[in-house]
Image (cartoon, rainbow, N blue to C red):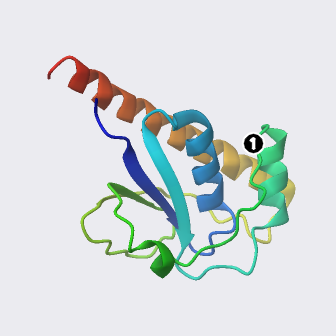
Amino acid sequence: MPVKRRVLFVCIGNSCRSQMAEAFARRYGSDVLEAASAGVYPAPMVAPLTGQVLKERNIGIEGHFPKDLSEVLHEPFDLVVNMSGLPLEIPRADRIEWIVPDPIGQPEEVFRSVAGQIESLVMRLILDLRSEFKSWNRGA
């Protein structure tokens, strides 16, 4: 059986986008991945609208808090999803870039729109990982 892929979602403050991505990945893709998130410059707290928008989708993030990228780099990751817009060098990990606007300081509708975009991207990633697992199971 293939091992789950360890995926790190990164944004600027680990208060909105990467928290959303981690929450969606844990909710929908726990069969193929282990998700974590961090920020390049972590905020003091998760933005309240992040929790609200996720709660509207029946996803709770109670107990989540912003983490500094340096706090998680001692862990091995297979894939880093960078939404920060900044160049990242994470050793021993594949990297992909997602261009997702930062909703900090924006109204609820923007948070909802960003959450929808991130949910779609995470679902596509999960489907790709599931395809890899199917290929592995077929011996391809």
Q: In the orientation shown, which residue stands out farthest toward the top?
A: 138
Which residue: 84% across, 41% down?
Answer: 56
Q: In the orientation shown, which residue stands out farthest toward the left?
A: 140
Q: Position of residue 27 (x, y in %)?
A: 62, 38
Q: Is 60 situated above or below 29?
A: below
Q: Position of residue 63 (x, y in %)?
A: 75, 61
Q: Secondary structure at mark 1?
A: loop
Depth check: give the residue in front, 120 or 34: 34
| Tally of marks | 1
Q: Could you tell me which quadrant the C terminus lies in?
A: top left
* Left or right, 73 with reference to 139: right
Which residue: 80% across, 49% down?
Answer: 53
* Left or right, 2 with reference to 6: left
Which residue: 85% across, 55% down?
Answer: 108
Q: Please tell me how crowded label 1 is: few (under 14), some (14-19), or many (20+) other residues with Cα within 10 Å.
A: some
Specify the amino acid type for callout 1.
Ile
Q: Quadrant of residue 132?
A: top left
Q: In the orientation shown, which residue stands out farthest toward the front?
A: 1
Q: Position of residue 7 (x, y in %)?
A: 43, 53
Residue placed under numbered mark 1 in the picture: 59
* Left or right, 5 with reference to 42: left
Residue 4: tell me if it is visible.
yes
